[in-house]
Image (cartoon, rainbow, N blue to C red):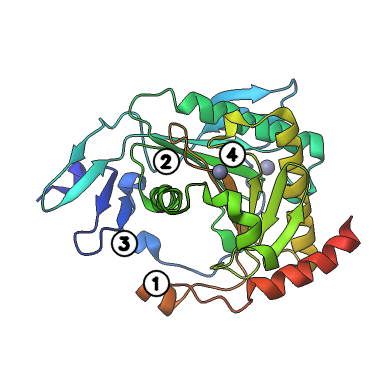
Amino acid sequence: MDSESDLRNEIRRDYRTGRFTIIAPDRGKRPEDFFQPKKEPKIGTKCPFDPGNEEMTVEIMSVGNPWKVRVIENKYPEFSPEIPFEEVDGKLEYISGYGYNEVVIDTPIHNITFDKLRFEEMRLWFDTLIEREANLYTKNYIKYVQIFKNSGPESGESLIHPHTQIMAWPAVIGTIKDEIDHIKEYKDRYNKCLYEDLKELEADRILIETEKTIAVAPYASRFAGESMIVPKRHVNYLQDLTAEEKDDFINVLILILKTNKKLFGDFSYNFSFHDIKNEPDFHLHLEVYPRLSIPAGVEFGQNVFVNQLPPEVYSESFIQKLKETI
Ligand SMILES: [Zn+2]
Ligand SMILES: [Zn+2]
């Protein structure tokens, strides 16, 4: 048995289910530190993401002078490049928590929500993500780079200042692995990428279609108001998008967020890019998960979600609201 001080970050594989969990003990928290008093809004605390407070964080890169987008080290990382890469097989399997966690500060403006950024600001944000993603793929042992956002109090966000997270994984596991397997299975069966059939598969659930991009409410959406944005051309990772495809993608993302806001108010949401280098069969997309209800016993006990807003109903209302948005 490891002594407590030997516990390091690692990705443990459940020997009963094959599921993975990241054990991240870095914060040195004791059980009593998880005691949850009633939340009081913090007043007068300095935001580490604000211009003027740059010394509070470790910068990786910034864009513009004064900066418009800034990338910093995540102060609470799940992974660290200082942990040696290690993959251990046996009755108890694990992969060491080698990897990188970065935070992209989307805008210098503290009191704004991400959906309110102008097209040019979001485009700059997108290019910064793409640059960091490409860079992280050059690091040793990095197999997958995940880009995701937590926005709003129900999303798990730690600071309200708009930001995005980038996590460089030492293994291809979890949903990205499942999706790679399913794309390959579909290709074996129908001899094409399943996203080529997206318009057929999601015919009743298309939210937006432009020249280069399509957004749908997925057939088996887990979350009320869930959507997915997909470039029409087969591209497996963000860096391969053309400038026109990026413009189009961002325009669609803005419409999705603004229209959802009209439908759901100031909703919390998470989104996660699914794209991966070195998997040419993969087809990149962005999944947006509004957090309008709280996953509970069915979800946690069975890992099967209950969605009370059928994607067909959502997409019909979305299209109505979209007409008012444009
Ligand atoms: Zn701030
Ligand atoms: Zn494809």
Which numbered disc flags the more N-terminal residue, 3 or 2? 3
Q: Label 4 CB, ligand 2: below 8 Å? A: yes
Circle 4 or circle 2, nearest the eye: 4
The residue identified by callout 3 is: 31
**Does the rendering let one see residue 52?**
no
Which numbered disc flags the more N-terminal residue, 3 or 4? 3
Distance from Cα at disc 1 to Cα at disc 4: 34 Å
The residue identified by callout 4 is: 234
Figure disc tally: 4
Nearer to us in this view, 159 or 253: 253
Nearer to us in this view, 192 or 8: 192
**Does the rendering let one see residue 64?**
yes
Q: Label 3 CB, ligand 1: below 8 Å? A: no
Q: Residue at x 75, y 50 (%)?
A: 115
Mark 2 residue element: loop
Q: Quadrant of residue 298?
A: bottom left
